[in-house]
Image: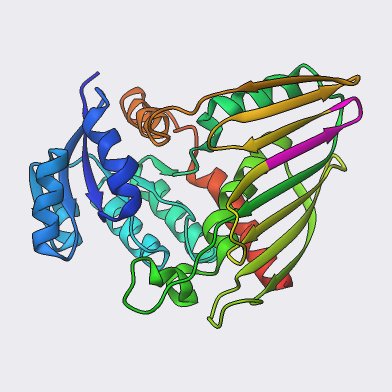
Amino acid sequence: MTPVKWALCGAGDICEKRVAPAIRDLPGAHPHSVSRRNKALLEEFAERFGFSRTYTDWKEQFRDPEAEAVYIATPVNLHREQSIFAMEQGKHVLCEKPMALNSREASLMLDAAKANGVRFGVAYYRRFYPMVEKIMEVLGDKGIGSPRYVQVQNFEPFNRKEGEARYWLLKPEISGGGPMMDMGCHRLELLHYLFGEIADLTSTLKTLRFQREVEDTSVALLTFKTGLMANVASLHTVQEPRDTIEIYGTEGSIHVENLNEGIYRIVKNGEKEKGVCPPRTNAHSPLIDDFCRAIREERDPAVTGDWALKTTELLDRIYSRS
């Protein structure tokens, strides 16, 4: 397969850790160009990850006829404008999560992708986790009977002062919201993937510890069309980080102590199975590899913009009902 030439827009934390290494290391991807405002940091980043061209102007970057695909890794308020502009230049787009500030913006992005005949995906990569594949296997085999209740806890102690890295996450006009928007979106998308459509929800969003514009505590209670109920809690207020999912069925349960690390326990008929499904070295690699293959095979990527819109619509409902 001829490697896809990538234009990376943004060079922050997630790009340092995962996106740029994946584009550099995957045989089906090629690090063509990267853009960011800070020229000195830009040149160092490009040299480290092998990008041959650098830009401080992302519009100029997207106009480059040699670039085939754009990875949007900027703050959420820029996703709509940058994605649509890239699509209008004929570029395929893989956008960071959450897809947009709201479903109205997300729908405009989808319209642009269809109008310009390009592939459009969103970086909800957790379905590629070996742990999630294990959960799907157990659920598919009815290993715990019919799922009836799910508990998701996602805690990260987080607050920032103006001028500090990632402070923009605390500005609703830039980020769209607090922990439910930033972290909870991954869990909402995963629950949709595992259990199907959500019929109803209630939510509570509060600022309980920090004085800031976005919530630091968010809880959503989801009711699926199957009757399954799920409680999703995303918090910035507690010291202990957590990334757990517990699935209770009519005949047993699945307990994932750390989704990123793949530590799990399955309980059925009084017996316990313990194990580890180690994550891949780079969690973004399967997502980007699939997107490259989708371009070359002229098919939809695994995580399409249409699919991701469902999560954005859920976020709209959660924030409007709190």
Looking at the rendered image, the quarter that the N terminus falls into is top left
Specify the quadrant of the image occupied by residue 47: top left
In the displayed structure image, the side of residue 78 where residue 273 appears, left or right: right
As displayed, is residue 246 above or below residue 297? below
Judging depth in this view, the residue of 99 and 191 nearest the camera is: 191
Report the residue at 67% width, 65% height from top. Answer: 218
Residue 45 at what x, y percent from top left? 15, 49
Using the image as rendered, state which of residue 265 and residue 227 is in the foreground. Answer: 265
Give the magenta part as a residue range.
Answer: 245-252
Chosen colour scheme: rainbow
Residue 159 horizontal/vertical position (percent) = 48, 70
Q: Outermost residue toward the front?
A: 239
Where residue 240 sits in the image (x, y, percent)? 60, 55
- The quadrant of the image that shows the C terminus is bottom right
Residue drawn where x is 37% and y is 31% of the image: 285
Most common SS among magenta residues: strand
Question: Number of marks in the image?
Answer: 0
* Left or right of 198, for residue 183: left
Tell me which residue sits at (39%, 71%) in the image: 167
Picture residue at 15% right of the left edge, 46% below the top: 33
Magenta region includes residue 300: no
Q: Which image quarter: residue 138?
A: top right
- The image position of residue 115, as x and y in percent, is 38, 50
**Would residue 231 appear left or right of 90 to someone viewing this image?**
right
